[in-house]
Amino acid sequence: MKNDIHPDYHMIKVVMTDGSEFMTRSTYGAEGDTLNLDIDPTSHPAWTGSNNQLLDRGGRVSRFKDKFAGFLGS
């Protein structure tokens, strides 16, 4: 393995949307950083089966809906 080409792999804390936390190894941030999740398996409609709306970050969902409005005659 070549030296100095791989990212630093260290322990971080992950905070899920319900407030639960766990420690894991990652290349994210620096040793001891916290990663706060916006969407996780406890809140994502694909896993929960709910019809909650996801946040439209940067208007991507709106642009998609506008672009394909009426595409299938709906």
Image (cartoon, rainbow, N blue to C red):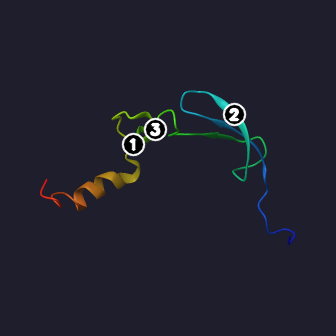
Residue 11: percent from left, percent from top: 78, 43
Indicate which disc, 1 or 3, sits on the residue closer to the N terminus: 3
The amino acid marked with disc number 2 is Phe
Secondary element type, mark 3: helix
- Residue identified by numbered label 2: 22
Hey, what amino acid is under mark 3? Trp
For the residues labelled 3 and 2, the Cα–Cα distance comes to 20 Å
The image quarter in which residue 6 lies: bottom right
Q: In which quarter of the image is residue 52?
A: top left
Residue lying furthest bottom: 2
Q: Which residue shows up at 18% across the image and 61% down it?
A: 71
Label 1 sits on residue = 55
CA gap between label 2 and label 1 equals: 25 Å
Which label belongs to residue 6? none
Image vertical order of residue 70 relative to residue 22, above or below: below
Q: N-terminal of the two: label 3 or label 2?
A: 2
Mark 1 or mark 3, whichever is nearer to me = 3
Q: How many numbered discs sit on the rendered protein?
A: 3
